[in-house]
Every structure is written in C-alpha cells, then in structure tokens.
Image (tube, coloured by chain):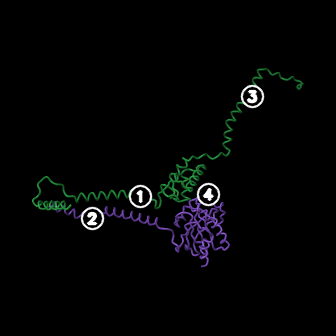
Chain colours: A purple, B green
Amino acid sequence: MSEVITESTQKVAARSRPPWGRILAWGGLAVLLALLFFGLLRTQSGGKRIGARAPEFTLTTFDGQTYRLEELRGKVVVVNFWASWCKPCEQEADELEAAWRYYQPRGDVLFLGVAWTDTDKKSLEYLQKFGITYPNGPDLGTRMAQAYRITGVPETYIIDRNGVLAYAKLSPFLSIEELKSAIDPLLED
Amino acid sequence: MRNNQPLRDVSPTRRMTAALLWMVGLLLLAGMTLIFVPQASAQNPTPPPAISDDQVNAIAKEMYCPVCENTPLDVCPTQACAEWRELIREKLAEGWSEAQIKQYFVDRFGDRVLATPPARGLNWLVYVIPPIAILLGVFLLYSAFRAWRRSAPPPAQASPPAAGSAPASDEYVRRLEEELRNR
C-alpha cells in the first residue's frame, strides 16, 4: 500500500515540475521559425517606397571625392546604378550625360553614378568610352545597392531637396525628355 | 747598353706555357660569364607569370558574384563573372595570395561573395542554427517516442483474462465486426 502511495506521489511530483526540456525545444523551434519568417519577408519585400525618406549613403568617387546624402539637402540628387558589363546601361549613358550637362549650370541638381559589382578598370573604361563627366564611384561592399534594394542595373533613383525618394526607374531612360519630366517637377517646389 | 740588349729568345716550351695560360684564362672568363649572366638578366623586368585557368578557378569556385545568385564564380557564364575571374588572374599575376584576393573582393563587394561566410555578426546563425535544429529534432523525436511508449497498451498476457475484462473485450469485438461489416 505504501509502495503504491510512494509511486503516485512521485508521479504527482513529476507532473508538477515544469517540463523545461520541452519548453526549450518548442521555444527554440519557434525562434527558428520566426527568424525564417522575417528573413523571407525581408527577401520578398520590394524596393524602397516612393515618398519615404531615401536611405542615407556615402559615395567615394573614383577620383577620391566623397558625397554624403545628408550633406546634399537642398539639391535634387539623381542616383544611377550601372555596370560596365550591362548593355541596357549603355543605352541610357548618353541621355544621362546630356541631362547632367543641361542641369549642371543650375547648381541644384547633382548626378551620382554608382558602379555596381564592377571592376575599377572596366568602370573607368566605360566612363571614358561614354564621356561621362558627373561624379561616379564604386558601390563598396554593395552597401548602397542593398540600402536601395536594387534588383539589377540600370536603376535610377531621384531624391528631392528634402531627402525624400521622389522617383524610381528600374529600366534605362530612353530620352533626355524622360529624365527632364522626372526632375523638373522637383525643382518647382 | 741596356737598350741594345737583344730580344729575349722565347723557347717553344715557354710559348706552350703561355698558350696554356691564355686558354685557362679564357675558360675562367667563360665560366664567370655563365655564372653571372643569368643573375644579370634576372634583374631585368620579366613578363608576369602565366596564370592558368585552374589557378583562377581554384579561387573562383569558392566565390559567388551577387549578379548571378547560386552560381559559383568559376562556372558562371556572364560577362560580370568573366571580368571578376580576369581580376583574380591579374591579382595572382601580381603575386597576391588567395586570402588577400578574397579579402579584396569582400572589401569591394561584401561578405556575400564568399561561399562560406565569415563567422561574425549575424553570420554566426549560419553555423549555430543547423546543429541546434538537429539537437532539437532529436530531442523532440525522443520525447515523442517516450510518450508513445507510455500510452501504448500493455502487451497481451498469456494468462487468462481477468473476470471483469470479458465484457469489455466482447464490446470491442462487436464494434470491430460492425466496422468491418460497414465497409
């Protein structure tokens, strides 16, 4: 009789003890699933929203000049991602340079070219080939590309005077008029 | 008087000795030329050593270009990857080590270029999660098996059933037969 009581008492004691192992296992599984969920969510989320604050960046050009977006308030900034191996980028190279030469005398529009996953040698050859004169630099560590969540090249982002992302184009510009129609409204503000 | 001295007579033996000395001298000169000329030419700028595709691919196979996801750099057919491989070749020709080249690419293009990400920051998760997941899985399986064993009915005994169990067994047999009939 006493053995039966002892056994039942042990069972009750075992039941009243929290099952730490099981809690840990299920908790760990939940954390893993949460990490997986947020990772997939981040991967699937699209580019930066128009109207949102543009991601800050620092670009050091091939000739050593440094541009920080936060220091460019008051200017419309055109950020063009490109690569020397990208054929569609060649389509818009002349238009971008022509637009830069058109806006440069005003002083309140800045074009910045960002060479994405490119080698310096090829980038410089490309700039020379198309006679590009606006500031260009490599995207070191692909940090800018990740901040703007680009999906390929060419992609162009236009940031207004207040640092807000106002326009995005995920394909080449076909004419200088297309560029003007994107930039001019931002200069009227 | 001294000026009027007759010229010394040179005997054939002496003439041979002189010739022999000349030959030894020439041989020494030739030997020294052989020794020193290669050293002199080594000081001249030499063309960069030819780097084979295998040497390039040995490094490229452990790298990925962000343009072509999930395709190793050594087999990626795109122009971007071809340029990267060319850059690896140039760096090897300049005498860079594999580690230096990889670091250069990481500095330029980020950690994602490496097939095996360095164990720092969030990258630790890559190394920590799989073993934890396996351990968790083993523990959950172990717990589940234990629970099943506990809830399983005791094995059939050879001894005759207790008096009270006969009606329950009959009821079970009846329900089983009914189920079979309904099928």
**Residue occupying the far bottom of the picture:** A189
Of callouts 4 and 2, the N-terminal one: 2
- Residue that numbered label 2 is attached to: A17
- Residue that numbered label 3 is attached to: B22
- Residue that numbered label 4 is attached to: A122
A179 or A101: nearer the viewer: A179
The chain to which mark 4 is attached is A
Measure the C-alpha gap from mark 4 to mark 3.
Answer: 62 Å
Amino acid at pointer 4: Lys
Amino acid at pointer 2: Arg
B43 or B156: nearer the viewer: B156
Measure the C-alpha gap from mark 1 to mark 4.
Answer: 39 Å
Numbered mark located on residue B145 in the image: none
Is label 3 on the same chain as label 1?
A: yes
Give the mark toward the camera: 1 or 2: 1
Secondary structure found at label 3: helix
The chain to which mark 1 is attached is B
Of callouts 3 and 1, the N-terminal one: 3
Numbered mark located on residue B128 in the image: 1
Q: Is residue B73 left or right of residue B37?
A: left
Vertical order, B82 against A79 (above or below):
above
Amino acid at pointer 1: Val
Is label 1 on the same chain as label 4?
A: no
Give the mark toward the camera: 4 or 2: 4
Measure the C-alpha gap from mark 3 to mark 1.
Answer: 80 Å
Task: Return the x and y of residue A81 as percentages of the image width and height.
Answer: 57, 65
Measure the C-alpha gap from mark 3 to mark 2.
Answer: 107 Å
Secondary structure found at label 2: loop
Measure the C-alpha gap from mark 4 to mark 2.
Answer: 68 Å
**Residue occupying the far top of the picture:** B12
Q: Which residue is at a point 12% across and 56% down the rendered structure image?
A: B161
